[in-house]
Amino acid sequence: MAYTGVDFYHMDGLLSEEERAVRDTVRAWVDEHLMPIIGECYIEGRFPKQIIPGLAELGVLGANLPEEYGCAGLNNVAYGLIMQELERGDSGIRSFASVQGALVMYPIYSMGSDEQKQHWLPRLAQGKEIGCFGLTEPDFGSNPSGMITTAKETKDGWVLNGVKMWITNGSQATVAIIWAKTGAVDDPKSIRGFIVPTATKGYTAKDQKGKLSLRASDTSEIHLEDVRLPKDAILPKSGGIKSPLSCLTQARYGISWGAIGAAMACYDEALQYARQRIMFGKPIGATQIQQVRLADMLAEITKAQLLCHQLGRLKDAGTMTPQQVSLAKRNNVSMACDIAREARRLLGANGILAEYHSMRHMANLESVYTYEGTHDMHSLILGQEVTGHAAF
Amino acid sequence: MKIAVCLKRVPDTEMRFAVAPDGKSLDASGLKFDISDFDGYAVEVALRLNEQHGPGEVVAVALGPDALQETLRKALSMGVDRGVHLKADPVPFDGLSIAHALAAELKDQGFDLILFGRVATDTGNGTVGPMTAALLGLPCVTAISKLDLSGGQGTAQRELEGATETVTFPLPAVLTIDEGIARPRLPSLKGIMAAKKKPVESKSAALGTVQLTVDKLELPPERTGGRIVGEGPDAVPELVRLLHDEAKVL
Amino acid sequence: MADCFAFAEFRAGAPRKVAFETVSAARKAADATGGGTVTALCIGGAGIAARAGELGRYGADRVLVVEHPDLARYSPEVFAATAAARLKTGACRAGFFSASAEGRDLAPRVAAALNVGLASDVTSFEVTPEALIARHPVYVGKAIATLRLTGTPALVSLRPGAVTAVEQARSAQVESARPALDPAAAQVKVTDLVQRAATRMDLGEAPVVVSGGRGLKAAENFKLVEDLAAAFGNAAVGATRAVTDDGWRPSSDQIGQTGRLVSPALYVAVGISGAIQHLAGMRTAKVIVAINRDKDAPIFKLADYGIVGDLFEVVPRLTEAIKRIRSEQ
């Protein structure tokens, strides 16, 4: 049966007509263009680059940025629904859209000059330029403030040196937003953002091989060796660790919705299977153990949907806090990991095959659990928020 | 070109459904609605014609309850310029009654083409298009699978049983669209946003007398299927025996 | 006593099977109302009069023949005007058309011209004093509607094959008639008619349909399906949307929600999983056989008989078995 989502508490009634239309359109696009190829791409370990023009034409790149920059100008609930439907397809595809929109277009939009915005945003929205976000380093993951990539000022501009790791879109990007310290290596206040065309001499990217998760995604190491940039490569309004963190808040918001999409996909697959699979003369959906699994999944999905809906309305009202996003990202990704695993188990032996989706989601979600602030980091963000003590 | 596309809001036939307590209609709970499949092809044809032949206007006309405004918005988000909602609740089963209302609306508006889907996926009647054409006194070609226009004339292909027919006709004309001619585009998200600002006019429908009604709606008797005769080629003799002796179809 | 009308479809100078169906239906309707005159109308090119008498075998009392060189091919305006004129002057209780490709085009035009209702694609009907009651599949065959047609004449188009042509011979009086509209005045002109592979039976007429789906893996493998159809001798070949979308088969072969809806006596589904939109096109077949290697394929729930196995082994065996049975018949 065709995928029709999960809506036990009639959340559709809380959405506007446009929000529903956006959700339905992206769902139909994923059905037509992504579902037929994703299993194969995942096994082969490649990102399906050929869908980029289609994604761009659909308007999902930077969808919540204003129309004047060639973007769709959607509200944040609609943006969240886009991420939900993309991740129902695959976390790697949603990661592509998160990076392009929240981690590349957003910093240019919020911290860039008018010239930078006019030049880069329309091109990124059209998929003519592909971006990546260089924050994480081999020794600085959960603690990005400690980064050692430097940007030294010269008479003509800047020269960047350093290594970034775990960079989504790193190898296929035409432009990178690189975060580097312009001052001393122990001075996080000197962190600034730079727009780095990847063809610039000294920028090399290397695919990180051997992944067992997010296989349909480009994950790369980036080496910056005396990368010389003009003065206007800097994002003028960037400054301090809060700059890249503000981008991460945007991305984490989208991920909170995305995880629900993956969970919904796994639940739907498990439910259809439970109805059809006969064992001991009846469908396995008629047995108590599988019913408990399904009931648990449905409850977690429903809770997460309500969580994100309110989060989206807060974001549209301008009052959303990063800690509120931490709660959602932490909860939703964790529950999605559990749902994917339980769905895999319900599917029995069939559940290990790539023609079923749950195990792929299960593997992907381990990366989603770890990136954009690990589950544990978000625990501490919330802990600090409510107790006042930083326990990092 | 100025093109009108008449479309219908129908239940998504992929859903499970049940008959309503009145025994004559579907139980609306749990139903999702969308543009009827063939009407979607007609919208796509209209949009492509204007992309090919230069700027023009595409108007979507739909008859039905207020809820169909969402269906009209979908057409607008695909690129249709404006919508006309002829209010009618319920929608009569009688295609001629609907055709009267459409003809009254479309008359004298200078449309070069009026497009319909070949058949609505709810009623399965396939009558409103040619009936509307007859009431408007316009040439009509139904079930077209290929279309070319040039210089005020059109050439179309129609699939018959075992044959393909080529037909020529002058404009203005009414055409009903079959499958195979164009896959409907998905609306872009910008299209969805732009649709909010496009005008939709709402007016009452001047329905004709209803002469065809539904007495009863029933689900077909459940086929008692599910009998696996056997596995592999060795099951063939038993299958053939059953087809001959039991089913008597050989 | 009610007079009834039947439009008898001709093609290439000969009556099609559906012509006998509409005449039989008109005969049934006339007899149900105390016995009236059944008038059949046929329109075509020069020479069709020679075959017109055959309609008497199915119950026509009177056959009006409109022969015109410009009407060898369908002309919607002329056919519609002529049928409407005859229905009007004939004071008929009911008029029957086929829901063939031509009939689906013709019948609505006639209904609009007469300002009467039309029950289209009907699978069965009864005539009562107050109304004509007809059954018609709706929601792509997922439900059946019982319709009530009021007004006179009550117009019906019949799903091909749903109403059996019954021989009940009358000595039909064949009369020559003129078209109600000058063919030269027609604006819509059929300029060409290309028959597709004449060896293939039409999906709507064949008693047996053998269909292939994705399980066949490649376009060339459709030969297995064609061989099985040939073994039956009276079978047409169908396809699922998946394989027509991929170009393995022409889209006119597609059976499904947006393709052909068929009701054969026997439907054999080869390598077809049973997506809902395909089932919509064939679920009304009398007997369904499925061959698929996946025992959980949804088609097995609908099929009367199924074989779980590799179609590349099963189908050739079945073809041999059918050939043998046919040669003994």
Image (spheres, coloured by chain):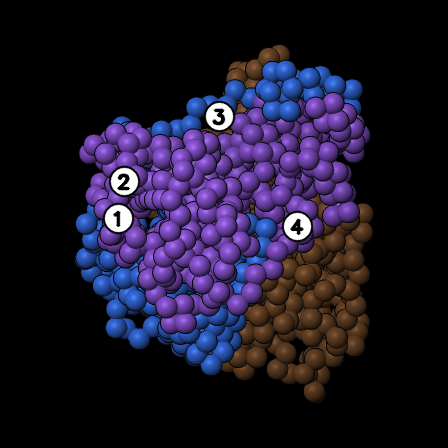
Chain colours: A brown, B blue, C purple
Marks 4/3: CA distance? 57 Å
Marks 2/1: CA distance? 8 Å
Q: Label 2 belongs to which residue?
A: C3
Residue at the image position 69 percent from the left and 66 percent from the top:
A173
Q: Earlier in the sequence, mark 2 or mark 4?
A: 2
**Residue C176 or A39: which is nearer the viewer?**
C176
- Labels 4 and 3 in the same subunit: no
- Labels 4 and 1 in the same subunit: yes
Residue at the image position 52 percent from the left and 35 percent from the top:
C263
| Pointer 1 chain | C
Q: Nearer the viewer, mark 3 or mark 2?
A: 2
The answer to whether one can see residue A325 in this image is: no
Q: Nearer the viewer, mark 2 or mark 4?
A: 2
- Few, some or many residues within 10 Å of mark 4 (<14, 14–19, 20+): few
Amino acid identity at mark 3: Ala
**Residue A14 higher or lower than A362, as above or below:** below
The local secondary structure at tag 1 comes to loop
Marks 3/2: CA distance? 64 Å
Q: Label 4 belongs to which residue?
A: C198
**Residue A359 higher or lower than A147, as above or below:** above
- Labels 3 and 1 in the same subunit: no
Q: Label 3 belongs to which residue?
A: A295
Q: Give the numbered dot on residue C90.
A: 1
**Residue A380 or A59: which is nearer the viewer?**
A59
Amino acid identity at mark 1: Gly
- Quarter-of-image position of residue A362: top right
Q: Nearer the viewer, mark 3 or mark 1?
A: 1
Residue contact at pointers 4 and 1, CB within 8 angstroms: no
- Labels 3 and 2 in the same subunit: no
